[in-house]
């Protein structure tokens, strides 16, 4: 981590500037990764900082996650924010309306993932709306096998794309991604007409980075690894510090 570039000052300036729309990934970005999806914890002060920053930007702050919307709501309660879940399959706007995209059949992928998990206890299957995630963080030596089996399963499912993330393989609709979710938010109040900033940590966030930068905004890569994002932070802790500082900045309220 010591050699990762730290663009915290540049990010703080963006988060504090009027006219910004803030988009945040959840796992590995806003919260630290854990051995299992259920093991993540929201650090003290994060919910309050998000609420303040959302207020200061007129409500133009949204979570863009691979998790379902309901899971994000449960982890940020009592705060309710605009959220895109399952990489854009689910999207709740600032008006509270939930939009759900059509999804292809992922039953063959789910069956194969569950069969693998039954054979290897270190694997964890996560079923989502129109998507299946196979986590191997507890059994990293199984990555080649998981990749081979999930690749074959996805090939039998038209309209399904396999994403290779941090210790996870996720089969999801090819027609939806985080870039598309952000684009949809920017067509709506209070996001429309604002400069988008999107922070994420994984390959699943690259579509979001590409979109916001094409739209005149900035992508922020959290952690190590190749990325199209123009800004970089060392860790979720660095992002949380920037969010807290921006939420308390007297110049950020609109």
Image: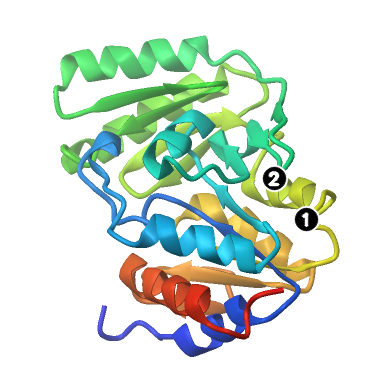
Percent of width and height locating residue 246: 51, 77
- For the C terminus, give its image quadrant: bottom right
Q: Residue at x 70, y 51 (%)?
A: 182
Q: Residue 190 carries which label?
A: 1
In the rendered view, would you say 162 is above or below 149? below
Spatial CA distance of label 1 from label 2 is 15 Å
How packed is label 1: few (under 14 Cα within 10 Å), some, or many (20 or more)?
Answer: some
Q: Which quadrant holds residue 31?
A: bottom left
Mark 2, residue position: 181
Residue 243 visible at all:
yes
Q: In this rendered view, identify the residue nearer to me: 128 or 164.
A: 128
How packed is label 2: few (under 14 Cα within 10 Å), some, or many (20 or more)?
Answer: many
Q: Residue at x 48, y 11 (%)?
A: 108
Q: How is the image coloured?
A: rainbow
Percent of width and height locating residue 96: 69, 34
**SS for callout 1:** loop
In the rendered view, would you say 154 is above or below 14? above
In the rendered view, would you say 237 is above or below 153? below
Q: Which mark is residue 153?
A: none
**SS for callout 2:** helix
In the rendered view, would you say 114 is above or below 229? above
Callout 1–callout 2 Cβ contact below 8 Å: no
Q: In this rendered view, identify the residue nearer to me: 86 or 81.
A: 81
Percent of width and height locating residue 125: 32, 23
Residue 7 visible at all:
no
Percent of width and height locating residue 71: 43, 32
């Amino acid at each position: 981590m010591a050699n990762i570039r730290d663009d915290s000052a540049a990010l703080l300036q963006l988060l504090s500037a009027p006219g910004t729309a803030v988009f945040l990934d959840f796992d590995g970005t806003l919260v630290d990764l854990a051995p299992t999806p259920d093991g993540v914890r929201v650090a003290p002060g994060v919910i309050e900082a998000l609420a303040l920053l959302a207020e200061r930007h007129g409500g133009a702050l949204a979570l863009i996650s691979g998790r379902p919307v309901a899971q994000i709501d449960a982890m940020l309660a009592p705060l309710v924010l605009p959220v895109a879940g399952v990489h854009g399959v689910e999207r709740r706007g600032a008006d509270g309306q939930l939009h759900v995209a059509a999804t292809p059949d992922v039953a063959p992928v789910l069956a194969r993932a569950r069969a693998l998990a039954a054979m290897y206890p270190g694997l964890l299957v996560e079923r989502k709306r129109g998507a299946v995630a196979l986590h191997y963080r507890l059994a990293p030596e199984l990555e080649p096998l998981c990749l081979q089996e999930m690749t074959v399963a996805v090939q039998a499912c038209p309209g399904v794309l396999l994403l290779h993330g941090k210790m996870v393989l996720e089969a999801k609709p090819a027609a939806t991604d985080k870039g598309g979710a952000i684009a949809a938010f920017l067509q709506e109040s209070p996001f429309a007409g604002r400069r988008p900033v999107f922070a994420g940590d994984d390959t699943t966030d690259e579509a979001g980075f590409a979109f916001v930068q094409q739209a005149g905004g900035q992508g922020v890569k959290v952690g190590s690894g190749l990325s199209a994002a123009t800004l970089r932070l060392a860790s979720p802790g660095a992002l949380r510090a920037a969010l807290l500082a921006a939420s308390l900045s007297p110049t950020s309220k609109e």
